[in-house]
Amino acid sequence: MKIAALSIINLLTGLVLAPLLPGIINKTKAVFAGRRGPPVLQTYYDILKLLRKGAVYSRTTTWIFRAAPVIGLAAVLAAMTLLPAASAPAPVSFAGDLILFAYCFGLLRFFLVAAALDTGSAFEGMGASREVQFSTMAEPALLLGLAALARAAGSLSLTGIFSGLTWQVAGPALVLVSAALLIVFLAENARIPVDDPNTHLELTMIHEVMVLDYSGPDFAIILYTSSLKLWALGALLVNILLSVLPLRGFAATGGVFIGLILLSVLVGIIESIMARLSLLKVPQLLAGAVALSVLALALVLRFTS
């Protein structure tokens, strides 16, 4: 009973605190730029403001455009239920749930791309094309990294993986997986050096261009979904690093939250000291993530054979 209650608390923590992460990233970037910057709670303010507005729909759009934000939110919520907090179990756990975790984000991407194409805009179609192109390399890096973790822990469940990882045996492989998942984290969340969430240059936009036609509550759902995605993929990386510590109970929940705060600060630092890569170099970066995951899987197979 206590374990089930702890799992629900971990899930609710992510649902409530996820919008803090974009605020921490923006505040870190403001500090590096010598500005005061927006408040850490700005994402909450934006979501509440958008929920009070009305939505505007183009006459060229169909039900796909209206359904995409809700389906995307449902997909990320499903992924959140599969996430453990360090050694604390996830609310939902079964053999093979790591595959469902990865494809929940694939479902989110599919409907956002379909909604962008549904507008009939060549501009949004351009962003959708880039999103799909880069995802074809980000998804293999994620799946191969998860495969390496599953082999190292001897489990096909995320809960079993993060309660069974041993750095003493698979330390080098876990470092490689962590580096690969950091690149995937930046790519999937449209962060520098893959994409710039604050850009207004038409020729460089990827994710933001796909949601340009959304407004009001629909855009509020998209902002909240983006925050949850930031939390979920970040927690995946933080859980790997926390597996070296014997955290139990609420200490595991607090450890994941602190780890996500530090990860958000790291993202803010990366975006402050790096420029966005050109579109021709992004595939090279993602290919590097795939190579790191492949090497990690090879090392794990060597250690466990």
Image (cartoon, grey):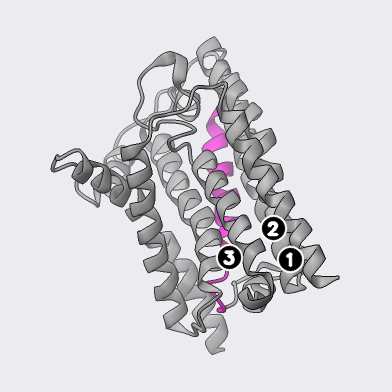
Neighbours of disc 3 within 10 Å: few (<14), some (14-19), many (20+): many
Residue at 57%, 89% (x, y): give it: 1
Front of the two marks 2 and 3? 2
The one of 305 and 3 positioned closer to us in this rendering = 305
Name the quadrant of the C terminus. Answer: bottom right
Q: How far apart are marks 2 and 1 (CA)?
A: 6 Å
The one of 226 and 138 positioned closer to us in this rendering = 138
**Is the residue under label 1 in contact with that under label 2 (CB below 8 Å)?**
yes
Q: Give residue 150's mark.
A: 1
Label 1 amino acid? Ala
Residue at 50%, 49% (x, y): give it: 229
Looking at the picture, how far across and down is residue 117, in whole percent?
60, 20
Neighbours of disc 1 within 10 Å: few (<14), some (14-19), many (20+): many
The quarter holding residue 36 reads top left
Front of the two marks 3 and 1? 1
Label 3 amino acid? Leu
Looking at the picture, how far across and down is residue 3, in whole percent?
56, 85
- Dot 2 falls on a residue whose secondary structure is helix
Report the residue that reaches farthest toward the right. 305
Q: What stretch is highlighted in magenta?
A: 63-88
Give the mark nearest the N terminus, 3 or 1: 3
Task: Identify the residue under disc 3.
Answer: 83
The one of 24 and 53 positioned closer to us in this rendering = 24
- Asked if residue 71 lies in the magenta stretch, the reply is yes
222 left or right, relative to 262: right
Looking at the picture, how far across and down is residue 258, in whole percent?
37, 67
Q: Main secondary structure of the magenta part?
A: helix
Task: Identify the residue under disc 2.
Answer: 146
Label 2 amino acid? Leu
Looking at the picture, how far across and down is residue 142, in whole percent?
66, 49
Compared to residue 74, the image places residue 97 above or below, namely: below
**Is the residue under label 1 in contact with that under label 3 (CB below 8 Å)?**
no
